[in-house]
Image (cartoon, rainbow, N blue to C red):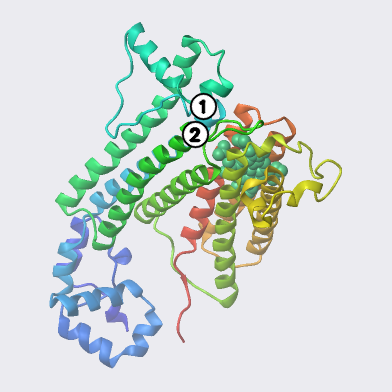
Amino acid sequence: MLSVFNIGRGCSRLLINRSIHPYNAPFKAFRASNTWSSSIIKSRPALLKKLANVKFLRLNITCLRNNTTHAQEIAKAVPKKAEKIVGYWLLGCSGMVFAAVVLGGVTRLTESGLSMVTWKLFGEKPPTTREEWEVEFKNYQQYPEFKLKNKEITLEEFKWIWWMEYMHRMWGRTIGAAFYIPAAIFWAKGWLKKGMKVRVGVFGTLLACQGLMGWYMVKSGLEDRFHGESDVPRVSQYRLAAHLSLAFVLYTLLLWSALDHLVPPKAMAATVATRRFRMLAHSCKGMIFLTALSGAFVAGLDAGLVYNSFPKMADRWIPEDIMAYSPKMSNITENPTTVQFNHRILGTSTLLMISGLWLLSRRRRLPPRAYTATTAVAAMAWMQVALGITTLLTYVPVPLAASHQSGSLVLLSLAVWLTHELKLVKMVPK
Ligand code: HEM
């Protein structure tokens, strides 16, 4: 039994070269030999179960599959320093996506999003002379936002909303450069593990889709479809929700992978109770995402400007016009009253669930950092709901609405951190 925890000379030298303390090695083995690996798998299954060391098992299986020794497999591994660099790169990219969401929110709230009426993949050149600005302004005047809402806008005011939208688009392209160029370099250097290569492919695809989705969303606000008396030119709430949720998904995946590299979770044997706690934490994360998605519909329909009272909606718990649209199902995504009502219900249910999770965490044995993460999630959930209510009661001022939007990403980040801390809470077979 003791010998299993010893490490052969060749292996320990490799580990020291990579600044890995043998105790933290991704395996616990004493011989770099396949014969030993295969024989222990065959002859000592009980011992392996007791160790419950998934990484050790994986290493043995890889050795068997590739017909290599432990030492050879470790030599192939990504150096520790490279792993950290990849981690910081992923963290940086997720931070940039966070900033893009905030910038996008401010662009929408300042009603700047429909000022640029064309889109070029590699960037639009900003006008420099007065003539060029006038041509750009003339282009804008052909579209519904100017014709129905902004007839009084001056060239100077137009320049301001144009720069807002330009910054949002250019920031998106900067994220593209900050992602694709290092991704290609790290790939070529062999710094990405097999699984990581797949993830980088997914992130790259999502990022490209995000850019295309952004333009698809803007296009819906430029179409000639606002003919009703109370119609306000704005982008489709469905496309806004798709654009926002895609950003949230990309952000979450980048952050999760960054944490994998930078703050590896602690392994812990799970009881049924801790496994339930982990499931509840994942459900809370899902609820935060769902509430944020419903928030995008509130934002898309300007539904924060109907019923500015809380907890009741115009002295009623359930507003009269909640089912005013026909067919009935369309109320969920098209009736501002229903959309706001659903967002309130989802927001408060999320808060209740997270508060329950926090209470439960006091009675569970968890990895040490998970306690801090649970408290942070609970504190942020209360802050987010307070921000939402204040935004509603004050008729959606830009700074509060923008803070409420960023708050939802902070809350999601903390929930991602918590679930990541619980990642290695695993059942130990008896
Ligand atoms: C966990 C709780 C909550 C989360 C995660 C959340 C998330 C969001 C998100 C992502 C948006 C879209 C922002 C945008 O794109 O600009 C939004 C909008 C909004 N939320 Fe919440 N929300 C929560 C709770 C609440 C509550 C309880 C209320 C009030 C009763 C509320 C009121 C609003 C309002 C008024 C808007 C529209 C703001 C705008 O037009 O920009 N939220 N929410």
Question: Badge 2 is on which residue?
Answer: 221
Query: Farthest residue toward the front?
Result: 227
Question: Badge 1 is on which residue?
Answer: 144
Residue 199 appearing in the image: yes
Q: Is residue 193 left or right of residue 112?
A: left
Vertical arrangement, residue 88 with respect to residue 53, above or below: above
Q: Position of residue 52 (x, y in %)?
A: 39, 78
Say whether disc 1 or disc 2 marks the residue closer to the N-terminus: 1
Q: Position of residue 218 (x, y in %)?
A: 45, 35
Where ligand 1 lies, by quadrant? top right
Query: Does the beta carbon at disc 2 come under 8 Å from ligand 1?
Result: no
- Residue toward you, 202 or 129: 129
The residue under label 2 is which amino acid type?
Gly
Image quarter of the N terminus: bottom left
Q: Secondary structure at mark 2?
A: helix
Query: Does the beta carbon at disc 1 come under 8 Å from ligand 1?
Result: no
The residue under label 1 is which amino acid type?
Pro
Give the quarter of the image for residue 212.
top left
Q: Position of residue 389 (x, y in %)?
A: 72, 39
Q: Position of residue 228 (x, y in %)?
A: 63, 34
Vertical arrangement, residue 21 with respect to residue 1, above or below: above
Q: Nearer the viewer, mark 1 or mark 2?
A: 1
Query: Farthest residue toward the bottom?
Result: 43
Q: Assess whether mark 2 and mark 1 are in contact (beta carbons under 8 angstroms).
A: yes
Q: Which numbered disc covers residue 12? A: none
